[in-house]
């Protein structure tokens, strides 16, 4: 009780008891996931430039969650958390090179054990693709390459450039060569083949991940647009963990000119719109087949994208642009469609929530907890904090790997405060109520000592070092 009271005092949030709901029917599950989609870069989240008509349409028929956080701002551990409902320190796939354990229980096992046909189509980032993690049907990048000629594959690689490139430009390649086009086509094929049986389909697109080289028609959507630039302070990254500044300088992001940044953001928005078009292809097929009447649909991304904010790109940090993700849940006969929720949600919560929304008892013994009652617009006991972990990845944080193997950054985010805790270096504290842009590190303010102490205790308690 002492801990709960302390957190409520920090967060300023009131939470009621859980309300139990009986399962009424079993529904299909369509999970649409993108890679590196900043939560704010969607029309349904209030963005006036990024064009996402299909995601917006799903949001208009579902519930939008405004404060959802990934469990690690990097692909492999985040995806491991989504499909297992556990933090990276528990499921073990902590950095980009870690394969999720072969015996890890996942959402596919949960639904497969209940008679569902299960499929993972697209970029799941399993690392070891021989491990299917319960998915009966698997389509990945190798299948996409197999359909291309050697000349097409070489031309596409040259067209796209380096995988982490942040120079925005249009692609010269036909749309059919993009892997997300193939993933959408294969998802449509799966839906048509499984229209008469229960299914759990996980469609995972590569975009809007770098490189920022969308098909020309999506690049041209932003032709002549006055792309707004994120606010960039002259002393960005200088008052917190020094590794972020070193990484931004090493990669050339810190000194991007306004014109370079504008073109890069245009490329990113083009990627977002191209991904959105493929989301639309799959969702439109679901409705064409009448499956939308008995399917829970989810859209989210594995993590965000800095897109120039704080003079950085990609992720690997705990700023809002990196760790906050979009989340939309649509289900048949949903009361309050088109509404939004502002309470804190973690992506580990998806597995128990989707199990319950599809008509089953939520699994226990995992880090995630169901927010199905919130989707249904009923009384819900909201999380008092959101938690995330970042382990320093080899070859992608700094070239010399100087931070690899050190303890991770642990984020604790309440309604008002965010602590990015490092046990061995300078931590960061942001007052998100008064500094939503996270420009001022308030870790040294004497009046915040009690807040830092309590959030540090939570970070250490939540983290599993083993």
Image (cartoon, grey):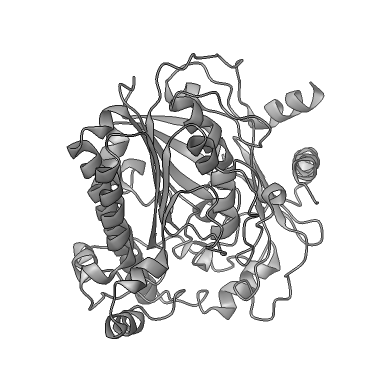
Q: For this view, does 364 lie left or right of residue 283?
A: right
Residue 106, percent across and down? 57, 43
Residue 52 can be seen, yes or no: no
Q: Is residue 409 above or below residue 384?
A: below
Specify whether 392 is left or right of 433. right
- Location of residue 213 by image quarter: bottom left
Depth order, front residue of 254/440:
254
- 48 versus 36 height, above or below: above
Residue 214, percent across and down?
A: 29, 69
Specify the quadrant that holds the N terminus: top right
Residue 128 in view in this figure: yes
* Image location of residue 291, percent across then percent down: 26, 33
Residue ID at (54%, 20%): 380
Q: Quadrant of residue 416?
A: top right
The answer to which image quadrant residue 130 occupies is: bottom right
The tally of labels here is 0
Q: Please name the residue shown 56% across and 27% down the image.
A: 362
Q: Is residue 424 left or right of residue 398?
A: right
Tell me which residue sits at (50%, 77%) in the image: 255
Q: Which percent across, then down, holds residue 67?
A: 50, 39
For the point 50% across and 65% down, the residue is 314
Q: Nearer the viewer, residue 346 or 322?
A: 346
């Amino acid at each position: 009780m002492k801990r709960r009271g302390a957190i409520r005092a920090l967060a300023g949030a009131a939470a009621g008891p859980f309300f139990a709901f009986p399962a009424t029917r079993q529904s299909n599950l369509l999970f649409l996931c993108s890679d590196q989609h900043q939560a704010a870069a969607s029309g349904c989240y209030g963005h006036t430039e990024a064009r996402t008509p299909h995601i917006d349409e799903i949001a208009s028929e579902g519930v939008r969650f405004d404060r959802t956080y990934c469990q690690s701002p990097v692909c492999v551990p985040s995806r491991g958390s989504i499909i297992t409902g556990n933090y990276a320190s528990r499921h073990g796939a902590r950095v980009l090179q870690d394969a999720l354990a072969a015996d890890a229980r996942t959402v596919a096992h949960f639904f497969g054990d209940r008679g569902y046909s299960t499929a993972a189509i697209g970029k799941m980032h399993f690392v070891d693709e021989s491990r299917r993690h319960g998915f009966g049907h698997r389509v990945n990048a190798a299948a996409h390459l197999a359909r291309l000629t050697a000349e097409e594959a070489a031309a596409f690689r040259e067209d796209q450039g380096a995988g982490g490139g942040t120079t925005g430009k249009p692609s010269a390649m036909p749309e059919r060569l993009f892997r997300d086009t193939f993933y959408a086509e294969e998802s449509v094929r799966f839906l048509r083949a499984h229209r008469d049986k229960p299914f759990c389909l996980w469609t995972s697109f590569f975009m809007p991940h770098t490189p920022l080289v969308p098909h020309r028609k999506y690049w041209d959507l932003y032709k002549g647009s006055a792309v707004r630039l994120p606010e960039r302070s002259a002393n960005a990254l200088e008052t917190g963990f020094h590794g972020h500044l070193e990484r931004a300088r090493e990669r050339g992001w810190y000194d991007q000119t306004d014109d370079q940044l504008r073109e890069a953001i245009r490329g990113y928005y083009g990627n977002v719109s191209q991904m959105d078009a493929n989301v639309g292809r799959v969702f439109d097929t679901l409705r064409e087949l009448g499956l939308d009447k008995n399917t829970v649909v989810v859209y989210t991304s594995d993590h965000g994208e800095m897109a120039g904010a704080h003079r950085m790109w990609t992720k690997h940090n705990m700023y809002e642009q990196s760790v906050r993700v979009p989340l939309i849940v649509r289900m048949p006969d949903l009361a309050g469609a088109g509404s939004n929720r502002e309470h804190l949600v973690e992506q580990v919560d998806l597995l128990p929530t989707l199990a319950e929304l599809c008509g089953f008892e939520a699994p226990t013994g995992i880090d995630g907890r169901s927010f199905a009652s919130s989707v249904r617009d009923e009384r819900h006991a909201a999380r008092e904090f959101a938690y995330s972990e970042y382990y320093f990845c080899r070859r992608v944080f700094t070239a010399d790997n100087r931070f690899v193997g050190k303890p991770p950054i642990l984020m604790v985010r309440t309604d008002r405060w965010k602590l990015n805790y490092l046990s061995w270096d300078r931590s960061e504290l942001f007052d998100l109520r008064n500094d939503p842009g996270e420009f001022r590190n308030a870790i040294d303010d004497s009046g915040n000592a009690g807040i830092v102490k309590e959030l540090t205790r939570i970070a250490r308690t939540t983290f599993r070092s083993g």
